[in-house]
Image: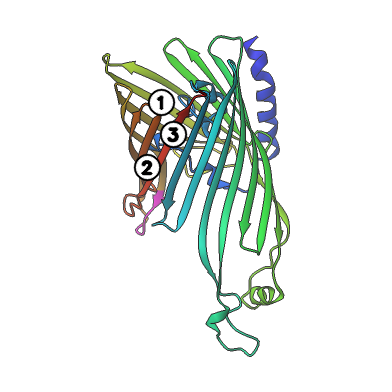
Amino acid sequence: MKKLYFLPFAIILSFCIKGYTQVTKYSNEFLNVGVGARALGMSNSYITTANDVTAGYWNPAGLLGINNQYQVALMHSEYFAGIAKYDYAAMATKIDSSSVMGLSLIRFGVDDIPNTTELINANGNVDYNRITKFSATDFALIISYAKKLKIPGLRLGINTKIIRRKIGSFAGAWGFGLDAGAQYDFKKWKFAAMARDITSTFNAWTFNLSEETKAVFIATGNKLPENSVEITVPKLLLGGARKFEMSPKLALLAEFNLDATFDGKRNTLIRTKAVSMDPHFGIEASYLNIIFLRAGLGNYQTFTDAIGKKIKTFQPNIGLGIKIKSVTIDYALTDIGDQSVALYSNVFSIKVDINKK
């Protein structure tokens, strides 16, 4: 019986993998940044223990961990010395004792970008008054549904994603995709699987360039962009976790995740022609379930320096949190995984439980 529940999931995933192995990598990458300072402090090792409103992003099956009627969350972070801003808001509510629904909204954008394509006027003179500004923004609306099955310890969830990407007035895209996730409790262990873009996510791009902008593209040797469809291929995330009760007041949670992609070799720790795997690990120590300290390792990569020497790097993350009654405030400090650059980002998130009076 357990195998029958996972059979359609496996068939869809294998079909998508075989059909789109040659598709260009790194589409909709803003959806891989991560949400919630708790998860980011654990290097995104969170698909197994996700049990709050942020599970709508990480693994919708985890929404069933919500104990209150409603739960809301907000997050703000900035990357590349504040150039790019990432905002997240989510809400989840119980439908009944065995099902939960959630909504998540993500915005990732770079604002106030100078547009100098029309800097030179019709007389060939530079006119700085012709410089305008625009934004390059990515939006995603995620509608989540989670259901507890009759099999003890098994929870399933599904996401419907609507994507809007916009580059000023020059270009825009609409996209649609599906995710599916599962969590399973076995004795003291927890296991999870999360399949993102299970049917592939399609972004349909349209371009609207003025005649002056087209002339600049041609004069500078750039190819005029054409309307096209961008495809995000399936990605499979696997995880396992366990919580250790060190004492009545102190507990330690550890989770290991493995992200698998099927679009050719990537710069990951494990890579073959068929699959690339990116492992990451996170821990969380809690005191009285009020104070939390977190750390994680991930984003293992290899690059060649100026003298041809291969160097391996990884991304360390740390974080902390505090829970006061129905409010939880989390903080994470992350970098881009390059110790020589160390562009650290401060991430703050807040989560609130709400009950009906």
Give the crowd class for mark 1: few <14, some 14-19, many >=20 residues within 10 Å.
many
Q: Quarter of the image holding residue 298?
A: top left
Please state if 83 lies on the left or on the right of 208 as rendered. left
Q: Residue 27, can we see it?
A: no
The residue singled out by tag 3 in the image is 351
Q: Nearer the viewer, residue 177 or 18?
A: 177
Residue 297: percent from left, percent from top: 36, 36
Type of residue at label 3? Lys
Please state if 141 lies on the left or on the right of 243 as rendered. right
Name which residue lies at 55% across and 84% down.
127
| Nearer to us: label 1 or label 3 | 3
Q: CA distance from mark 1 to mark 3?
A: 21 Å
Q: CA distance from mark 1 to mark 2?
A: 16 Å
Q: Which residues are magenta?
A: 303-307
Q: Earlier in the sequence, mark 1 or mark 2?
A: 1
Residue 69: percent from left, percent from top: 53, 23
